[in-house]
């Protein structure tokens, strides 16, 4: 794999992100949210020039009341994506690890939602120690339109949670 570095996105990266992923309005919105202190947009760059993957760490209160009540203060890992040409090289794993270390500074857990029907994704998360917390949670998905408006669609997901604090080993002081 070429050299990969994960960095927090900056406003000056906007055009590079749009060229790489499209999703103009999505990135504009996430950079605004980041600027307001509501989250962190992390980008994996190959050779410092090409955005290969991204993830948004949601640090604001969750939109879903069940998450706000049941996972108080727990950051959410959202919108993990690696561009097809860069998949299966460990880039998503790098992004997730970076998000986990940022989350660990604020909470002992990290949560995310996965579509119930994506068994390969469930295996991906299970292999990274994420456990089911709530099944079939009703959630809203933001659909960013070309004119900059956002439609909200009802969706269902399985919520997974990882304990970021390593458990002390029995018998070890
Ligand atoms: C899922 C995804 C982020 C993985 O990115 P990646 O950089 O290829 O992942 P890594 O190289 O770090 O790890 C490879 C893992 O992805 C799994 N994987 C490969 N293709 C996959 C796919 N289409 N769906 C789910 N998982 C997949 C592999 O089985 C492997 O898992 P393992 O290490 O536990 O065996 C990428 O396929 C993607 O962007 N998919 C579309 C968006 C998406 O589904 N995002 C997740 C939302 S929860």
Image (cartoon, rainbow, N blue to C red):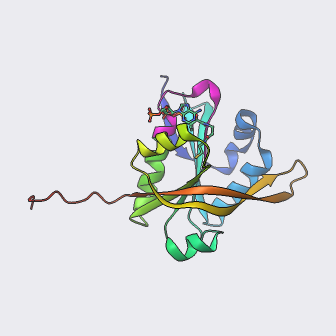
Residue 103, image x, y percentages: 45, 59
Residue 138, image x, y percentages: 67, 63
Residue 18, image x, y percentages: 75, 39
Residue span colored magenta: 79-93
Residue 15 to residue 131: above or below: above
As drawn, which residue projects farthest toward the bottom? 69
Judged from the image, the quadrant occupied by ligand 1 is: top right
Residue 59 to residue 117: above or below: below
Is 144 included in the stretch rendered in magenta? no
User: Closest to the observer: 105 or 74?
Assistant: 74
User: Closest to the observer: 55 or 116?
Assistant: 116
Q: Is residue 63 left or right of residue 99?
A: right
Q: Count of labels shown?
A: 0
Q: Is residue 64 visible?
A: yes
Q: Residue at x 59, y 41 (%)?
A: 118
Q: Residue at x 77, y 43 (%)?
A: 23
User: Closest to the observer: 88 or 33?
Assistant: 88
User: Closest to the observer: 160 or 94?
Assistant: 160
Residue 126 to residue 136: above or below: above
Residue 62, image x, y percentages: 61, 68
Q: Residue at x 87, y 57 (%)?
A: 149
């Amino acid at each position: 794999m070429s050299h990969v570095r994960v960095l927090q996105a900056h406003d000056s990266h906007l055009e590079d992100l749009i060229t790489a992923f499209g999703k103009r309005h999505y990135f504009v919105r996430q950079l605004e949210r980041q600027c307001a202190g509501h989250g962190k947009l992390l980008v994996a760059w190959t050779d410092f020039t090409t955005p290969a993957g991204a993830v948004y760490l949601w640090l604001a209160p969750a939109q879903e009341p069940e998450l706000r009540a049941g996972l108080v203060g727990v950051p959410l890992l959202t919108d993990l994506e690696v561009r097809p040409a860069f998949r299966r090289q460990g880039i998503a794993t790098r992004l997730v690890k970076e998000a986990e270390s940022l989350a660990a500074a604020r909470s002992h857990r990290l949560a995310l939602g996965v579509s119930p029907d994506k068994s390969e994704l469930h295996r991906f998360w299970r292999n990274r120690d994420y456990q089911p917390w709530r099944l079939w949670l009703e959630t809203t998905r933001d659909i960013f339109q070309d004119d900059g408006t956002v439609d909200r669609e009802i969706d269902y997901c399985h919520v997974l949670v990882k304990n970021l604090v390593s458990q002390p080993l029995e018998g070890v002081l």
